[in-house]
Structures are given as C-alpha cells and as structure tokens.
Image (spheres, helix red, strand yellow):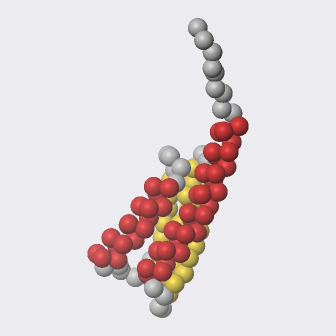
Amino acid sequence: QGFSPSDFTRAYLNEVFDRIREEAPASSCMKATVSKVRNTYRAVVQINSSAGQFFATASSERLTDLGHLIVSRLHRQLDRWKSKRQLHSSKHTFVYRGSA
C-alpha cells in the first residue's frame, strides 16, 4: 500500500516474511502488509494459529531497519510461545524404564 516496491525491495520483504514464517507455528496463517507514507515505511504482521495469535507493527524510514524491527518483535513473541510449549510438554513427559 502507498508505494510500488521494486523487484529488489519485494525480494527483501519476501525474505523477511519467510524468516518470520519459518518460526511460526505449523499450519498457521500469516498476513503481512507494508505501506509507505511520505518517507516512512510501516509493516503490520498478524499470525493466526491454533497455538495463538501473534501481532506486531514497526515503522522506520529505512526498509532494512523496518525488516529488523518486525522480525525482532515477532521473534520475541514466538520465543515466548516456544518456551511455554516446551515447558508444558516437559511436564507431561512419561518415560518407561522396565524390563520384559
């Protein structure tokens, strides 16, 4: 929205969103938009999954800074989700050590 990205810019943004998608829960749905108003880029990313919803926004005059900001903000949320998931799954681990 608000600008027509060059092929280079489009490739960079796809790379940024691919990095986010790789960290997202399996079978999640991600929507990402980037707009430009005057000299400022704005990114909005929303991830919906059965594990929860993740949402972040970022603004910057530099596209590379925007990419780093949005990845960092979502990465923090996804790390919290992963640590809770690992903590939860470790509480329900059953190990059988027996002989036949």
For this view, does 35 lie left or right of residue 74? left
Q: Residue furthest left?
A: 7
| Residue in the image at 53% along x and 75% along y | 69
For this view, does 76 lie left or right of residue 62? right
Question: Looking at the image, is 32 positioned above or below residue 79?
Answer: below
Where does residue 33 sit, x and y in percent of width and height? 48, 70
| Residue in the image at 60% along x and 64% along y | 76
Q: Which quadrant would the N terminus be assigned to in this image?
A: bottom left
Where does residue 55 sit, x and y in percent of width and height? 60, 64
Numbered circles on residues, count:
0
Q: Which quadrant would the C terminus be assigned to in this image?
A: top right
Question: Looking at the image, is 44 positioned above or below residue 6?
Answer: above
Q: Nearer the viewer, residue 82 or 20?
A: 82
Where does residue 47 sit, x and y in percent of width and height? 55, 58
Where does residue 82 sit, x and y in percent of width and height? 60, 51
Q: Residue furthest bottom?
A: 38
Q: Nearer the viewer, residue 96 or 82?
A: 96
Q: Residue furthest right?
A: 91
Q: Is residue 87 visible?
A: yes
For this view, does 42 lie left or right of residue 94? left
Question: Looking at the image, is 70 positioned above or below residue 50?
Answer: below
| Residue in the image at 57% along x and 64% along y | 74
Q: Residue furthest top?
A: 100
| Residue in the image at 53% along x and 71% along y | 70
Q: Is residue 43 visible?
A: no
For this view, does 85 lie left or right of residue 29? right
